[in-house]
Image (cartoon, helix red, strand yellow):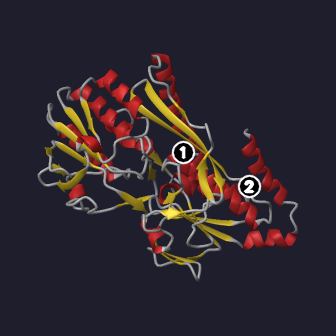
């Protein structure tokens, strides 16, 4: 058990010796968490564990949560769809009240949350983990209707399965085009892992096909490692065009499966995967905690929204400086917020804010790569811990790549159990 984990669990033990008036205040407190993904479900579970007398309600419309992490492996045929699904019975057993409804609106002054059922929940603290929404029409011609023909598949669900069906129906020798937005967006290495997983599927079933990546930026996470891995496993099947190579897409014609770049180049696809610019999920905007960027700026020490006291925002919806929008990061943030709220409600010292992230990416079976970082709060912001970034080495041998692939699979199994499956 890590020192950090021991200190968090120790806080709950100390609470039993707290003055009775403090325990009574904690017992009367109601914390509502919106969003049952990596950040929200973690915050709900760990808050109930650390402060058992606090009433914790998790609001999530889906009865089964399908993860974006590892959904690329579903596209490759390396995982089943149901292997990405997680229910909420484990959180119920942990004492969390799970409500399957959509959060519609927030009244910050009255501290109420309005649900799609018409019910209103009164909260003393609110944790928002709504993930992302897509910026429809940020790319000219790409709206919700266009996504039915040119799927984004950037929220795991019907779009992911649609993209898989389109890949299966594509003729051998066809062209798969993916458009990639500028930062920030959910899962920075995700598009490049997806390219590899699509290439794996094509190599098995449609070996004459090609993949064209049109990217709005010139650099991306683990770039040198991806380029090396693509070439080693797939030869010339994947072509990447960055900003300097006229890779930024300005317009989409979903009906014709065509895109046009900012300099007028046109590309026609057999399958078109458009990953558009993104923003925080709608309830964050309704709560009034987003800024002009569309994301939620947060305080580094506790992820409280800068625009509203009593509201904490974790996961992809938050803007947390150098921390990427990843499942690992969301889980880490959810634990910190749970510890901070437990301490606040039970009259204990606040925990020191320390964060970490690791992103594993699969380029092919037995070929994994990773990047990791450590972060801390400084002057109210999240900053990198100097010299903490670790990345897989170039030119590593087959045993090293295979080990990283196994580590990635083990990470997914472990974090799923930590959040939902226990």
**Mark 2–mark 1 distance (CA, rounded to whole Å):** 20 Å
Point out residue 271 in the picture as x, y percentages from the top left corner: 19, 43
Q: Secondary structure at mark 2?
A: loop
**Vertical order, 419 against 301 (above or below):** above
Point out residue 257 in the picture as x, y percentages from the top left corner: 15, 49
Residue behind mark 1: 328
Horizontal side of residue 28 vs 267, given as left or right: right
Point out residue 317 in the picture as x, y percentages from the top left corner: 48, 59
Q: On the image, which quarter does residue 1 sit in?
A: top right
Q: Secondary structure at mark 1?
A: helix
State how many labels appear: 2
Viewer-closest of 373 and 363: 373
Considering every residue shown, the one lying at the far left of the view is: 256
Q: Are marks 2 and 1 in contact (CB under 8 Å)?
A: no
Considering every residue shown, the one lying at the far bottom of the view is: 110
- Mark 2 or 1, nearer chain start: 1
Horizontal side of residue 390 vs 161, given as left or right: right
- Name the mark nearer the viewer: 2 or 1: 2
Identify the residue shown where x is 38% and y is 31%: 226
Density class for disc 2 (Cα within 10 Å; few <14, some 14-19, many ≥20) is many
Q: On the image, which quarter does residue 44 sit in?
A: bottom right
Identify the residue shown where x is 70% and y is 71%: 29
Viewer-closest of 262 and 129: 262
Point out residue 314 in the picture as x, y percentages from the top left corner: 55, 58
- Would residue 401 be seen by someone viewing this image from the given angle? yes
- Would residue 214 be seen by someone viewing this image from the given angle? no
Residue behind mark 2: 351
Horizontal side of residue 305 vs 69, given as left or right: right
Identify the residue shown where x is 77% and y is 48%: 7
């Amino acid at each position: 058990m890590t020192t950090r984990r021991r200190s968090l669990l120790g806080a709950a033990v100390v609470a039993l010796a707290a003055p009775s008036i403090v325990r009574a205040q904690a017992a009367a407190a109601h914390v509502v968490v919106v969003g049952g993904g990596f950040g929200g479900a973690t915050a709900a579970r760990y808050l109930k564990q650390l402060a058992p007398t606090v009433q914790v309600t998790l609001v999530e419309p889906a009865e089964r949560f399908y993860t974006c992490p590892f959904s690329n492996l579903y596209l490759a045929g390396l995982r089943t769809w149901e292997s990405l699904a997680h229910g909420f019975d484990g959180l119920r057993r942990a004492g969390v009240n799970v409500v399957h409804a959509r959060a519609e609106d927030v009244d910050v002054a009255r501290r109420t949350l309005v649900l799609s059922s018409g019910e209103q929940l009164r909260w003393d603290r609110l944790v928002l983990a709504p993930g992302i929404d897509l910026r429809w029409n940020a790319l000219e011609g790409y709206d919700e209707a266009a996504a039915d023909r040119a799927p984004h598949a950037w929220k795991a669900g019907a779009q992911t399965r649609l993209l898989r069906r389109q890949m299966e129906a594509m003729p051998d020798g066809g062209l798969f085009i993916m458009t990639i937005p500028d930062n920030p967006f959910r899962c920075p290495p995700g598009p490049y892992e997806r390219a590899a997983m699509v290439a794996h599927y094509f190599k098995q079933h449609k070996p004459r096909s090609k993949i064209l990546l049109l990217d709005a930026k010139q650099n991306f996470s683990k770039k040198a490692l991806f380029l090396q891995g693509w070439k080693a496993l797939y030869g010339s099947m994947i072509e990447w065009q960055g900003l300097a190579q006229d890779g930024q897409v300005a317009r989409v014609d979903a009906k014709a499966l065509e895109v046009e770049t900012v300099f007028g180049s046109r590309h026609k696809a057999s399958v078109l995967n458009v990953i558009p610019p993104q923003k925080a999920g709608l309830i964050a905007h309704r709560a009034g905690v987003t800024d002009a960027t569309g994301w939620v700026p947060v305080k580094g020490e506790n992820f409280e929204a800068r625009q509203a006291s009593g509201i904490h925002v974790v996961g992809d919806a938050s803007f947390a400086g150098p921390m990427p929008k990843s499942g690992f990061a969301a889980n880490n943030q959810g634990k910190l917020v749970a510890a901070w709220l437990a301490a606040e409600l039970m009259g204990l010292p606040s925990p020191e804010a320390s964060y970490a992230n690791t992103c594993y990416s699969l380029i092919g079976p037995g070929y994994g790569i990773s990047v990791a970082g450590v972060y801390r709060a400084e002057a109210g912001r999240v900053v990198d811990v100097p010299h903490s970034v670790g990345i897989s080495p170039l030119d590593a041998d087959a045993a090293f790549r295979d080990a990283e692939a196994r580590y990635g699979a083990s990470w997914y199994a472990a974090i799923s159990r930590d959040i939902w499956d226990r």
